[in-house]
Amino acid sequence: MKKTLMIFAAIVLMAGFSTTIMAQTKATKTTPAGAVLIVPMTITQTAPLHFGSITLLSTIAASTVTLPSSSTTRVFSAGVEAAGVSSDPATNAAYDVTGTYNETYALTLPSSDITLTEVGGTNAATMTANAFTAAFTAAGSTATTSTLSTAGTDDFTVGATLNLAIGQTAGIYAGTFDVTVDYN
């Protein structure tokens, strides 16, 4: 028994005198974290798109009226002209946009013809509008992208081309189209 006790004591002493040296195995790096909180975009129409009063000069020619996005000065092709007395002036569609400040966004306009239908007429005549363009107030030119201000606001106007068919029926016409804004 004495011999077992001595072997046990020798093992304990040897374990106590041995030292283990290890190299550093751990490193730490402080890493930044963040988030971007986006406010949902809103769009409010402040004026409708209206080509104004137009005089039909000829029933044998197809005609166009172009309303630029940056002004209400219309361009007429042969067969139509501005009405001499107009209670219905031309107006660009106008919109206010809100969202997250300093964020860029894209505007989507109709890419194909929209139909305007005679209101209250017996013929249900139609004509089309196409070639939609937009002008952002801040940009000062025609574009389809813009950046919200430091207050998170922006605005733009829309123009298009009205297409009158040969023998277009006189009357009041109306239609609708979609305008979409979304962050880039």
Image (tube, grey):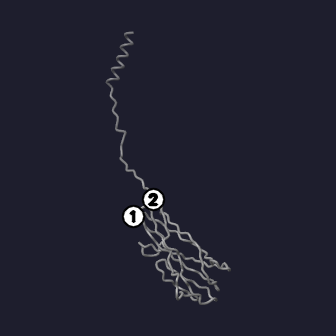
Disc 2 secondary structure class: loop
| Secondary structure state at the residue bearing disc 1 | loop
Provide residue 2's location: percent of width, then percent of height.
Answer: 37, 10
> Badge 2: few (under 14), some or many (20 or more) residues near its Cα, within 10 Å?
few
Residue in view at x 45 percent, y 62 percent: 99
Taking the image as shown, residue 167 lies to the left or right of residue 157, namely right
The picture places residue 128, in percent across and down from the top left corner, at 60, 78
From the viewer's side, name the closer residue of 106 and 96.
96
Q: Residue 141, image x and y in percent?
A: 44, 76
Can you identify the residue that label 1 sits on? 151
The residue located at (51%, 83%) in the rendering is 74
Residue lying farthest right? Answer: 122
Looking at this rendering, what residue extends furthest in the top direction?
1
Q: Is residue 123 above or below residue 36?
A: below
| Residue in view at x 35 percent, y 18 percent | 10
The N terminus: image quadrant: top left
Question: Given the image, on which type of amino acid does mark 2 rest?
Answer: Val
Say few, some or many: other residues with alpha carbon within 10 Å of mark 1 (under 14 / 14 to 19 / 20 or more): few
Please state the horizontal and vertical placement of residue 42, each as a whole percent of the image.
48, 63
Horizontal side, residue 106 vs residue 11: left or right: right
Asked whether the beta carbons under mark 1 and mark 2 sit within 8 Å of each other, the answer is: no
Per the rendering, the mark at residue 139 is: none
CA separation, marks 1 and 2?
Answer: 12 Å
Numbered label tally? 2
Which residue type does callout 1 highlight?
Ala
Q: Which residue is mark 2?
A: 39
Quarter of the image holding residue 98? bottom left
Q: Earlier in the sequence, mark 1 or mark 2?
A: 2
Q: Look at 41% across and 64% down and name the residue there.
A: 152
